[in-house]
């Protein structure tokens, strides 16, 4: 359970980046300090900003600018990369097509998933077979270089998802009958391990819920990425780390974009609380096991209303 945090910490991870290949990294006091801050954030709120991450500001902005350009296109252009069950749920979805807990979100988006050979993940993986579309995806995945060294080396075969999301400003909205503060994305937790959010400057929209139920703003801080712990990492840590509810509120007339990179476990990974995390609470198992791919596919079907997609 998250604590009653009132703000989200900003953590400068540059010592970790500089020294991660140093054989004496575990003895380094600067690195220990970063690890201490990360541990605290993972336990207290499950959210933190990172700075000193090594992704140039200009690249983060270029990706957001490209997203704005795409969403500015006429609808007929955008649906040229339309998402459906037939595209492996990859591509463009219009405003209100994404559902959170059955309710339409006031957003449009492009979804991309790691590409893999048809058949690689058997019957379960079939739902997500397809190829990603459009150039921005390549750019958005520049963020992936951050995680690149994990692939094949440390994490084995991680899955990933990228969402490029556009939230129309209040007055621009083409959807009639909206409430005053409308929901760009309903309250949810993320599915995999770690999320990195590259959000537009100057438009507060992302909110994170603390234990008392208060919504704490994750206001944009230029040059930072917002990071949050996701469901699979919560299970692995036996609930030591929090996968915290968050949502996106639109109360600005400005169009906002966010580009989110979700770093995930292997598609077939069976996720169970790690032994040493159970030992911290007298061996008690606090989270149920999950198979990541099953969990993801169930969520994807839930988000888009499978009958709706099958009939399109
Ligand atoms: O737009 C944002 O700031 C975050 C979106 C989000 O929470 C998500 O896509 O999972
Ligand atoms: Fe999220």
Image (cartoon, rainbow, N blue to C red):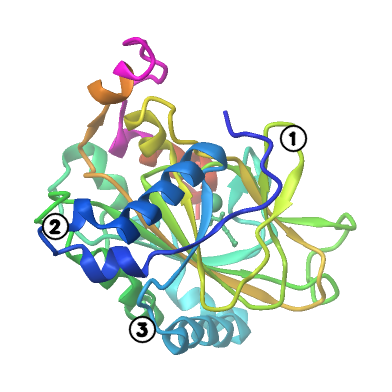
Q: Closer to the observer: label 2 or label 1? A: 2
Tag 1: Cα neighbours inside 10 Å, few (<14), some, or many (≥20)?
A: few
- Which residue shows up at 35% across the image and 20% down it? 280
Taking the image as shown, residue 256 lies to the left or right of residue 67, namely: right
Q: Closer to the observer: label 3 or label 2? A: 2
- Which residue shows up at 62% across the image and 85% down it? 72
Q: CA distance from mark 3 to mark 2?
A: 41 Å
Asked whether mark 2 lies closer than 8 Å to ligand 2, one says: no
Spot occupied by residue 245 in the image (x, y as percentages of width and height): 60, 41
Q: Secondary structure at mark 2?
A: loop
Residue interval drawn in magenta: 279-295
- Quarter of the figure that contains the N terminus: top right
Mark 2 lies on residue: 24
Instruction: Examine the rendering and report whether any part of residue 178 can be seen.
Output: yes
Query: Is tag 3's residue or tag 1's residue first in the polypeptide sequence?
Result: 3
Residue 90 falls in image quadrant: bottom left
Q: Which mark is residue 135?
A: 3
Instruction: Examine the rendering and report whether any part of residue 85 can be seen.
Output: no
Q: Secondary structure at mark 3?
A: helix
| Residue 202 higher or lower than 23, as above or below | below
269 or 47, which lies in front?
47
Mark 1 lies on residue: 213
| Residue 195 higher or lower than 193, as above or below | below
Q: CA distance from mark 2 to mark 1?
A: 42 Å
- Which residue shows up at 29% across the image and 39% down it? 293
- Which residue shows up at 61% across the image and 79% down it? 75
Ligand 1 - quadrant of the structure image: bottom right
Spot occupied by residue 220 in the image (x, y as percentages of width and height): 64, 70
Query: Is tag 2's residue or tag 1's residue first in the polypeptide sequence?
Result: 2
275 or 93, which lies in front?
275
309 or 206, which lies in front?
206
């Amino acid at each position: 359970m998250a604590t009653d945090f009132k703000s989200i910490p900003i953590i400068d991870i540059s010592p970790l980046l500089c020294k991660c290949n140093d054989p004496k990294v575990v003895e380094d006091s600067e690195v220990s300090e970063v690890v201490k801050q990360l541990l605290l954030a993972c336990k207290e709120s499950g959210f933190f900003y990172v700075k000193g991450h090594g992704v140039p500001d200009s690249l983060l902005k270029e990706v957001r600018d490209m997203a704005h350009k795409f969403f500015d296109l006429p609808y007929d252009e955008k649906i040229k990369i339309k998402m459906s069950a037939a595209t492996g749920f990859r591509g463009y979805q219009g405003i209100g097509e994404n559902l959170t807990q059955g309710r339409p979100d006031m957003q449009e988006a492009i979804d991309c998933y790691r590409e893999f050979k048809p058949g690689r993940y058997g019957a379960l993986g079939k739902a997500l077979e397809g190829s990603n579309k459009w150039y921005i995806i390549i750019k958005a995945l520049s963020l992936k270089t951050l995680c690149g060294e994990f692939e094949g080396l440390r994490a084995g075969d991680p899955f990933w998802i990228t969402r490029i999301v556009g939230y129309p400003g209040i007055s621009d909205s083409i959807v009639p009958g909206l409430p005053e503060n409308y929901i760009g994305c309903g309250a949810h937790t993320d599915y995999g391990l770690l999320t990195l959010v590259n959000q537009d400057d100057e438009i507060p929209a992302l909110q994170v819920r603390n234990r008392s139920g208060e919504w704490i703003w994750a206001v944009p801080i230029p040059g930072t990425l917002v990071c949050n712990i996701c469901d699979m990492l919560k299970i692995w840590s036996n609930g030591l780390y929090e996968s915290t509810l968050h949502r996106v509120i639109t109360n600005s007339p400005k169009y906002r974009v966010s580009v989110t990179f979700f770093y995930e476990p292997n598609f077939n990974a069976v996720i169970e609380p790690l032994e040493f995390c159970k030992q911290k609470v007298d061996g008690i198992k606090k989270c149920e096991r999950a198979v990541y791919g099953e969990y993801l596919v169930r969520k994807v079907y839930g988000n888009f209303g499978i009958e709706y997609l099958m009939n399109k």
